[in-house]
Image (cartoon, coloured by chain):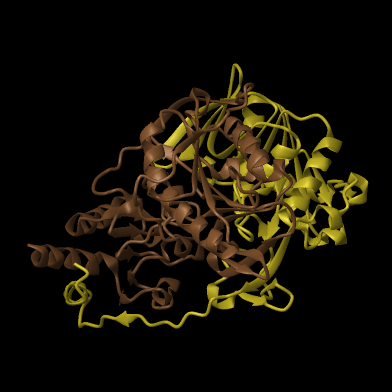
Chain colours: A brown, B yellow
Amino acid sequence: MSEKGGVLVVAEAIDGALTPISAEVVGAGKRLAEEFGTTVSAVLLGSGLESAASTLAALGPARVLVADDDRLADLQTDPVVATLAAVVASEEPGAILFGHTPNLREAAIRLAYRIGAAITTDAIALRVEDGQVVMTKPVFGGAAIAEYANDAGPTIATLRPRTFPAAEEGGPGAEVERVEVPADLGSRTRVVETVREAVTSGPRLKDAKTVVSGGRGLGGPENWPVVEELAGALGAAVGATRAVTDAGWVPPSHQVGLTGTTISPDLYVTVAVSGAVQHIAGCSGSRNIVAINRDPDANIFRHARFGVVGDYQKVVPALTRRIKELRG
Amino acid sequence: MKIIVTVKQVPDPDIPPTHFKVDEGARKVVPPSGVAPVMNGYDGNALEAALRLKEKHGGAVTVLTVGGPEARDTLKRAIAMGADAAVHINDPTLVDADSSTTASVLAAAIRKIGEYDLIISGRQASDTDAGQVPLGVAEILDLPSVAPVVSIEPSESGLRVHRMVEDGYQVIEVGLPALLAVSSEIGEPRYPPLRGIMAAGRAQIPAWSAADLGIDPARSRRTTLRRLYVEQREARVDLIEADSPEEAGVALADRLREAKLI
């Protein structure tokens, strides 16, 4: 039985595995449902979803709805929106939550416009006030915070990854229900191929416990090895500011920031990074930020726990050598 | 190819954080004196992408904005860069329009312009950082959309584009007409050449109102901005001092070890 006015969360699988953001969205959905005295239904779309669906069920949503269809394999926006619109029409949720991910944010926005609802994208907090969901979101590149409430339709939000506590896996959970996929499901976009850019070295940026980033202050791509060597000594993932990826020193997949990857490592070391608000928006969840910059007024120092004001060309090689000694 | 580019005028995103102020009562940013508003960065990339397509494959580029009288400067800059025509939707009732209203207004204006093959927008504006207006326009006009796009080439079926995904990109075929929301990787916007600046000086830019487009902003609003504020931060950085930068590097490593971070 569906419960009208419940919370619908949209989960996501990549290569058949449930993504970490899915557990975060279920977690956020559960807290919202508790406040409203309702329940969470989770919907998963794609193809070959058996294992991802059981992982999703173990996260404890009251219902697990699965649309498993070859036409949804690439998560193209047209078939995803058509399927979700059908689910929303039958479930009539009061709130719909997505991860703010490359695969789903486009579909989330189009779904909102299709059903005449408002949407808040890249939300970092949700709370209930006067019976309404208030969504918090950084604006102006993170320089200010805005709080929005919807005036029409269900509350829809995409949630910034690595910001909301994830739901924990428990018992086997609810039985998986199959969703009827619309018969005329088509897509006006077609994926010819997916090209994965090889990670040059070290761990993946978004999951790394330690990240080292370089900024435009390095002066040029010929100085990039200084960043890589420090990352190598720390066993860290390598990140970059938007200025650096736009200049083509490293591929766009290395970008940390509002329009790149959001990171929340234990240790984030920045080399010649000024700390533009759009960069801070992607790294403010870091537990400890270290700044090395020659400009004592650089914004990055307002966010750092440790800092060195000085020429990175002299500071960083010495830092790298000493870290190698200390880590043996 | 007939291309429409949507642009937005925004506060200069390079305003130093120490000069960035909001009026919490009015829920608005206080424009710092002496810093002129600019064309949204990604919209500059969108216009650049359109101009490159036009130069390579022929066609015409029309830019479209919703904004107050001062937004005309952004349209003039677009013409100076090489756009063929511009339309200014200028209506005091749209000053605080939400994304839903803005998307409705743009979609209505695009219908009124009539013929087009492609709409190119920036992936998001640097003020609201929402990224929803272009996709809202695509939904209202029932067009296919792709976002964020980092390269565009004509193909047999329409366009072949690269769409950013985690760790790489997808190669996507899409038929026309379509809407693409582009990211900065697509190319730096050009500086306006002198003859462009002169053309912009002479350009006739029609101004349309919400009523001209049959839009009632009071009815299309769907969101309330409840609060807008700047988070106060106290600098609490522990600056490592030493006699030389090399010694500071060593001392930093020792401090990180002390704090059990390495």
Query: Please, is residue B71 above or below residue B233 in the view?
Result: above
Quarter location, residue A280: bottom left
Residue drawn at point x = 82 percent, y = 58 percent = B94
In the displayed structure image, the side of residue A283 where residue A2 appears, left or right: right
Depth check: give the residue in front, A157 or A52.
A52
Depth check: give the residue in front, B196 or B102.
B102
Residue drawn at point x = 35 percent, y = 72 percent = A294
Query: Please, is residue A282 above or below residue A310 in the view?
Result: above
Quarter location, residue A176: top left
- Total number of numbered discs in the rendering: 0
Q: Can residue A251 be seen in this view?
A: no
Residue farthest to the front, as pictured: A1
Q: Can residue B65 be seen in this view?
A: yes
Query: Please, is residue A262 above or below residue A297 in the view?
Result: above
The percent position of residue B140, horizontal first and vertical second, equals 75, 39
Residue drawn at point x = 73 percent, y = 33 percent = B142
The quadrant of the picture occupied by the C terminus of chain A is bottom left
The percent position of residue B45, horizontal first and vertical second, equals 59, 45
Depth check: give the residue in front, A50 or B194.
A50
The percent position of residue B74, horizontal first and vertical second, equals 73, 54
The quadrant of the picture occupied by the N terminus of chain A is top right
In the displayed structure image, the side of residue A326 where residue A47 appears, left or right: right
Residue farthest to the top, as pictured: B156
In the displayed structure image, the side of residue B18 where residue A200 appears, left or right: left
In the displayed structure image, the side of residue B230 where residue B84 appears, left or right: right
The percent position of residue A83, horizontal first and vertical second, equals 60, 33
